[in-house]
Image (cartoon, grey):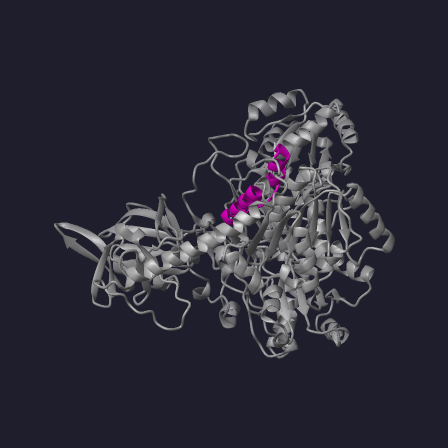
Amino acid sequence: MTLSSIIKLLGRSPLTTELLNKLQQYQSLQLNGAPRLPKGLVTSTLAQQQQQNLLIVTATLEEAGRWAAQLEAIGWPTVHFYPTSEAFPYEPSYSEEMIWGQMQVLADLVSENAPENSTSNGNSNNKAKMAVVATERSLQPHLPTVKEFQPYCLTLAPGITSNSKIFDEKLAQMGYERVPLVETEGQWSRRGDIIDVFPVASELPVRLEWFGDELEKIREFDPSTQRSLDKIPQIVLTPRNFSQWGLGNLESMTDSTFASLLDYLPENTLIAIDEPDQCAAHGDRWFELVEEHWQQLNNDEASSPLPKIHRTFADSLAEVELFPRLYLSELAKETKSDITASVPYTLNLASRPLPVMPHQYAKLAENLRQQRERKHSIFLISAQPSRSVSLLQEHDCAAQFIPNPHDYPAIDRLQTQYTPVGLKYSGLAELEGFILPTFRLAVITDREFYGQHTLATPTYIRKRRQATSKQVDPNKLRPGDYVVHRQHGIGKFVKLESLTLNNETRDYLTIQYADGLLRVAADQLSSLSRLRNTDKKKPQLNKLTGKTWESTKNKVRKSIKKLAVDLLKLYAQRAQQTGYSFPTDTPWQGEMEDSFPYKPTPDQLKATQDVKRDMESERAMDRLVCGDVGFGKTEVAIRAIFKAVTANKQVAFLAPTTVLTQQHYHTLKERFAPYPIEIGLLNRFRTTNEKKEIQRRLATGELDIIVGTHSILSKTIQFRQLGLLVVDEEQRFGVNQKEKIKALKAQVDVLTLTATPIPRTLYMALSGIREMSLITTPPPLRRPIKTHLAPYDLETARTAIRQELNRGGQVFYVVPRIEGIEELAGKLREMIPGARINIGHGQMDAAELESIMLTFSAGEADILVCTTIIESGLDIPRVNTILIEDAQKFGLSQLYQLRGRVGRAGVQAHA
């Protein structure tokens, strides 16, 4: 909610009052001449001043994702991203995820008891308002009517009464699946008077505790541990899907009446159509596709009426006109389009972009002084605001950092003096600075200050909360599972039962042993652990009265003692070789780490702590960071690199492929843009003269970081003061290259990153010879990649590609050899007209390959037909479908790495 103070400021503007009066008078306004951020600020101000909900309609899912991230930064209490299917007409959608995402939004809209909350403009008496972002496709009639849908939505709160049998039948009617244990959306279970259910519209499952027919408590619970969490006042249960209304059945879709998202909105909702001409173009193209596919389904009989789930964009706009509405356009158009021809009032916001002047702080300070003289309110939105404010102050520009963005009195006090206000923001919104003279407002961001762009591409992610626990939970055990008791050894779990002893009823786990049963009280679970049996043979049960388990423990103790002695000798030898002891973290270190737009996982934080501890010790570091693809190993390396550079040491970042070095280079340039850090790139894309210049700058210490392939290990490369070597995907380097790496290891700290370590490296790490940090926790909201195995069929490939392109994504098409790659690309161009297809492989000219990869990374191509040049570490969040032809010709490690190139943005990915 960093930008809520700007909303408060705009709310006091006389122009806002004028616009509200015009909107009250005409019910529609056109706002031109401003990009997304000023459009969002003005639109949000108008909605929040009138305590209205807001619907933003965009042309594409990608743009909707950007709007949703921006509205969260602006400070809306609730922001929903309403997903719509981007599949072709009458083709199945990817999964239930989209439907469940829609249910989340509909549940909030039909809920009669909206929570009281303070709004972003500081008025505590206002109801919490909701912003919804959707594409123009949401205006199509694709939902049951509100009258049909509402009876299937149950609002449950403590105190309500319901017959248990009727309640169970209701859950079945709503499509919920009865299971022994609730683990995912759409499931429910009953244990006496306790019902567990995972509503598809909720972020966590709930536990309903009944007393007879009365609901006593509602608690959320953790699906991974089954442990109850906090009480909640109410929950809305929606149907699992829309099948009971015939959606998906062609006959029903032709005869029945359906609703659009508009029908679910409160009457006073403010609707903003972003770039209406683009929305109209998308809507018209979609309707043409609908007509074409419908005729094909009906054997080209044009007389067959279209299903009622379709209508033209013009018909949808007629429904929009029942609401107060805004038409937003970035261009200041002199003539109106057909869509906005009837809009009676147009305001040109006359927004101007601020010049991007990375590291030219004197010019930036002068620019802001000019804005101050014009009596403009100035906001500096930055991931490292204290540093940005200090730089302005050094150049005679008064500015002040306000740590709390809701400290409105302090912000107002500075604004009355026209002093630039620094606010911290490190989220996913794409923020770009602007000057809005109509509101006397100037906003500057890290893009103008440091040349730093957004570090992530916002996209649709269904809201969830995650919680995990590694302790044994009786609800996760199945009868027949093997467990280990600390005193009695290996047994088999039989059941969980309640027993009454001495007039006290308690839950017990019954464990089968070779010579009897053992009952373990539920409050003594710490003595049990699950047996991790890697052998296919069934483990032998221990005896309760035997000595086998005690003998086994004694053997293990002796083995551990011997290993400890050996390791002690090894580390004593290594301790004699002292290395450089890096200083503790600087303030810059904290600022740089805080600029990471995601919340680091616990494993990432622990790995970072391990690495820093090693670097600060006198012993040379040799640490392996092992984690699945996309789990955030590179971020750990970035933090270590920054620590080394701020200690005046040079860093070498070694990667196995040219393409991967390009990516690491651009990532480091982006993350370190606010700091005076020089970064070089050494790979085959560099000319001979460029390589010589890089060698010279490394030798003199002018370069702080060098990213490159094995050419970094050349004898011609001399470092002035190398302090850290980072090796990405060590398993991809040859024996000779590894020997050169070993020679460097004796002198500097070494950090190795891998998802698939070679057996020797893994063994050394597991045995303790090398230090290892594991990253086993996926990033929040990361979804498992769906892997499909199918016979070779270009039609299957065409369907998968079209579905990905129609949801605004990109596709990798990987082949095992270069031969025939041009012919394959030609076939794809014929099958998917209009798709932008590039070809990439290792035998291409360096400059050409670099251009192709940069074009694809920037989203200017849809499909990359390539060899395994993309195998290691490549991270392009928009790519969420990968097709691998002749998969049997790749190794398992290769397939695992290739599969990991997708699914890095939170959307459902397919391999």
* Highlighted range, magenta: 586-614
Q: Main secondary structure of the magenta part?
A: helix
The answer to whether residue 304 shows anywhere in this view is: yes
732 or 861, nearer to the observer? 732
Q: Is residue 347 left or right of residue 262?
A: right
753 or 372, nearer to the observer? 753
Position of 884 relative to 679 (above/below): below
Residue 18 quadrant: top right
Residue 238 quadrant: bottom left
689 or 776, nearer to the observer? 689
The answer to whether residue 600 shows anywhere in this view is: no
Q: Residue furthest left?
A: 502
Q: Position of residue 92 (x, y in %)?
A: 55, 69
Q: Position of residue 806 (x, y in %)?
A: 64, 63
Q: Position of residue 612 (x, y in %)?
A: 57, 42
Q: Is residue 773 left or right of residue 379?
A: left
Q: Residue furthest right?
A: 689
Magenta stretch: includes residue 540: no
Quadrant occupied by the C terminus: bottom right
897 or 749, nearer to the observer? 749
Position of 99 relative to 675 (above/below): below
Q: Position of residue 129 (x, y in %)?
A: 50, 40
Quadrant occupied by the N terminus: top right
| Residue drawn where x is 40% and y is 72% of the image | 536
Magenta stretch: includes residue 611: yes
Q: Is residue 331 left or right of residue 24?
A: right
Position of 400 relative to 764 (above/below): above
